[in-house]
């Protein structure tokens, strides 16, 4: 079992500011191709950042990159690779390693190599909001292909369910369950997935 605990804003505020500066540099770098907005989501946006004090993995940030390519001038693969190249160009300025490309996100990490620890990391999901809902770039590692996929139906209910939970003063239940899920995460699920699971379980328990 892990030993995840909540991290205070003071503990991660400097790292968050560095990350914003990095994103701004990438925005300028890719401007000849497309523009994008960014949003901190999940645990960071709700002051629920966690860290396992018994492991070599620090806290993480979840960020959505909303790409403006309405004319569809670039394929999903081209967009992901253009962004990856941009992050890789400037990541070292903020002590991040080169980005890693996974199924749903690009991940960058700050490492303490002397002690074999990850101090903190950031996961970037590339998304597009359209009339039929939000899509994200999905990377199929086995086939080495990229494609836009729609978020699952449960994704669209989150904000509505969060509002209902807060209105009924159940947010501490969310914090407790989320921390429990982090500490028993034997499947290596991402924080954003665990947060969504937490919201849905609390909602189902109290309102359905």
Image (cartoon, rainbow, N blue to C red):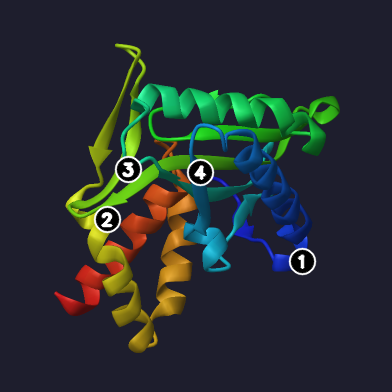
Q: On the image, numbered disc 3 is attached to which residue?
A: 70
Residue 9 visible here: yes
Task: Residue under label 2, please give it.
Answer: 155
For image coordinates 49% across by 23% down, the residue present is 81
Classify mark 2: residues with Cα within 10 Å, few (<14), some (14-19) or many (20+).
few
Nearest to viewer (mark 1 / mark 2): 2
Q: How many marks?
A: 4
Lower position in the chain sequence, tag 1 or tag 2: 1
Give the x, y percent position of residue 94: 79, 38
The numbered mark, 3 or 2, whose residue comes first in the sequence reads 3
**Residue 161, relative to residue 32: is it above or below?**
below
**Could you say which is closer to the camera, residue 53 or residue 138?**
138
The picture places residue 38, in percent across and down from the top left corner, at: 52, 52
Q: In whole angstroms, how far apart are the C-alphas of marks 3 and 1?
A: 38 Å
Return the residue found at the far left: 208
- What residue is shown at x 73% (from left), y 55% (from top)? 17
Q: Secondary structure at mark 4?
A: strand
Q: Is residue 64 left or right of residue 155?
A: right
| Chain-order first, disc 3 or disc 4 | 4
Q: Which residue is mark 1?
A: 10
The residue beneath circle 4 is 35
Q: CA distance from mark 4 to mark 2?
A: 25 Å
Q: Tell me which label, 4 or 2, sits earlier in the chain.
A: 4
The residues bearing labels 1 and 2 have C-alpha atoms spaced at a distance of 30 Å
Residue 49, located in which quarter of the rendered image?
Answer: bottom right
């Amino acid at each position: 079992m892990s030993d995840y605990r909540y991290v205070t804003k003071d503990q991660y505020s400097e790292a968050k500011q560095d990350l914003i500066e990095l994103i701004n540099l990438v925005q300028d770098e890719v401007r000849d191709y497309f523009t994008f907005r960014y949003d901190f989501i999940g645990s960071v946006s709700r002051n629920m950042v966690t860290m396992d004090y018994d492991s070599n993995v620090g806290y993480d940030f979840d960020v959505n990159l909303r790409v403006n390519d309405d004319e569809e001038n670039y394929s999903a693969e081209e967009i992901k690779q253009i962004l990856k190249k941009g992050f890789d160009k400037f990541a070292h300025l903020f002590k991040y390693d080169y980005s890693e490309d996974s199924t749903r996100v690009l991940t960058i990490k700050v490492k303490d190599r002397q002690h074999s620890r990850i101090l903190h990391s950031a996961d970037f999901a590339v998304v597009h909001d359209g009339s039929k809902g939000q899509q994200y770039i999905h990377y199929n590692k086995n086939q080495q292909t990229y494609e836009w996929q729609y978020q699952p139906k449960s994704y669209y209910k989150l904000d509505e369910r969060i509002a209902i939970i807060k209105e009924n003063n159940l947010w501490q239940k969310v914090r407790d369950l989320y921390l429990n899920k982090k500490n028993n995460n034997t499947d290596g699920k991402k924080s954003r997935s665990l947060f969504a699971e937490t919201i849905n379980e609390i909602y189902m328990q109290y309102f359905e």
